[in-house]
């Protein structure tokens, strides 16, 4: 069992959790993720480790409630517990002193980009960050990204905050201005990452994206997270999640991510019809944590 220390919404349907996971907190590196299962019969979902505090033994994840499982997770609060948190998984971000690095986060992708921005800054790079959101209320981690950056640009679709426009427009402006850019990291919706790749491709700027395809076990055994990179099949959970954007087949990635959409929609509709029952099922594990004698297997090792 993994107790939730703190939980708070950052934006509509986007929630930050601090979870007790000392072993993971002590080993995690930027770019890695965990597989979370809320309760024994729950779905496994991958979530990037946005931050970690080894001294406190906690990791931070930021969750956008889109499907049944993420919405259910976002209904939990401090004092509740999560059944399984496995990690750290995946290859860490490649952190070196590249020179000038542009870090781009679109939507909740900012939470994924943040730890790498911090690591890039600590490695001695000049970090320019571009954060994109639909509107002001969806801008995430602005203060944290500003602290990790030499420059920060905020872009909103509706112009309610920062500058109106897309993250790719700001990236293009930086390139056109003659600013030296040695590396770009872009994390967000598939179409956004693909668009960033097309902006940097003519200039041969090394561009890295973090992929989040359908994933089950996180160890490469199920093959669900396979992606096509440079014409070869790779597995995001063990070979990634970060890959060269100019080699990713985004068309196949988008097709695979939509493969189970009808099933996901049916699960979401069922959850919406009776969310209380789903929350009670998830919190059953918390009861077992407080009173192990009621659990089916006796005391649980957290």
Image (tube, helix red, strand yellow):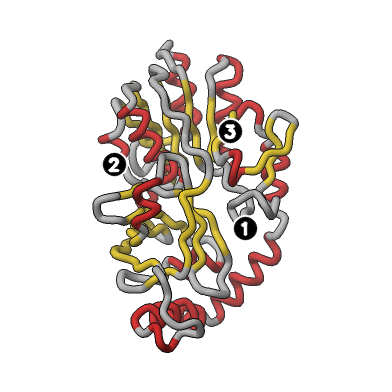
| Residue at the spot 65% in from the left edge and 49% down from the top edge | 220
Q: Is residue 214 left or right of residue 290?
A: right
Is residue 158 something that shows in the picture? no
Quote the CA–CA distance across marks 1 and 3.
Answer: 19 Å
Q: Is residue 89 above or below residue 291?
A: above
Kindly tell me whether residue 61 is visible in this rendering: yes
Q: Counting other residues with Cα less than 10 Å from the Cα at mark 2, is it few (<14), some (14-19), or many (20 or more)?
A: some
Q: Which residue position is annotated with label 3?
A: 243
The CA span between labels 2 and 1 is: 31 Å
- Tag 2's secondary structure? helix
Residue 144: assigned label = 2
Q: Position of residue 34 (x, y in %)?
A: 48, 53
Using the image as rendered, state which of residue 241 and residue 206 is in the foreground: 241
Compared with 35, 31 (above or below) is: above
Q: Position of residue 119 (x, y in %)?
A: 35, 33
Of the two numbered discs 1 and 3 on the same chain, state the one appearing first in sequence. 1
Residue 150: image quadrant is top left
- Say which residue label 1 marks: 216
Mark 1, other Cα within 10 Å: few <14 / some 14–19 / many ≥20: some
Q: Quadrant of the N terminus?
A: bottom left
Numbered marks: total: 3
For this orientation, the residue located farthest to the right is: 231
Nearest-to-viewer mark from 2 and 1:
1
> Do labels 3 and 2 touch, CB within 8 Å?
no
- Left or right, 235 with respect to 232, comes to left
Q: Earlier in the sequence, mark 2 or mark 1?
A: 2
Query: Where is residue 144, by image quadrant?
Result: top left
């Amino acid at each position: 069992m993994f107790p939730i220390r703190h939980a708070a919404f950052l934006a509509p349907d986007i929630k930050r959790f601090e979870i007790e996971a000392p072993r993971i907190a002590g080993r995690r590196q930027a770019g890695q993720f965990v597989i979370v299962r809320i309760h024994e019969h729950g779905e496994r979902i991958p979530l990037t480790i946005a931050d970690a505090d080894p001294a406190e033994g906690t990791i931070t994840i930021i969750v956008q409630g889109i499907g049944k499982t993420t919405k259910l997770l976002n209904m939990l609060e401090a004092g509740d517990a999560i059944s399984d948190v496995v990690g750290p998984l995946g290859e860490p971000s490649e952190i070196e002193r590249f020179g000038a690095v542009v870090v781009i986060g679109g939507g909740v992708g900012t939470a994924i980009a943040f730890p790498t921005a911090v690591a890039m800054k600590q490695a001695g790079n000049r970090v320019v960050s571009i954060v994109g959101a639909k509107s002001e209320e969806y801008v995430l981690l602005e203060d944290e990204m500003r602290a990790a950056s030499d420059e920060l640009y905020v872009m909103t679709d509706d112009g309610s905050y920062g500058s109106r426009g897309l993250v790719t427009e700001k990236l293009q402006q930086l390139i056109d201005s003659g600013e030296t850019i040695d590396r770009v990291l872009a994390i967000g919706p598939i179409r956004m990452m693909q668009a960033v790749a097309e902006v940097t491709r003519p200039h041969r700027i090394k561009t890295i994206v973090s992929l989040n395809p359908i994933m089950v076990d996180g160890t490469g055994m199920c093959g669900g997270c396979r992606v096509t990179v440079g014409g070869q099949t790779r597995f995001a959970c063990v070979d990634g999640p970060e890959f060269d954007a100019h080699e990713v087949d985004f068309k196949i990635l988008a097709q695979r991510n939509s493969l189970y959409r009808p099933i996901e929609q049916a699960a979401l509709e069922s959850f919406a019809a009776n969310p209380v029952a789903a929350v009670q099922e998830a919190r059953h594990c918390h009861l077992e944590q407080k009173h192990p004698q009621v659990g089916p297997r006796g005391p649980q090792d957290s």
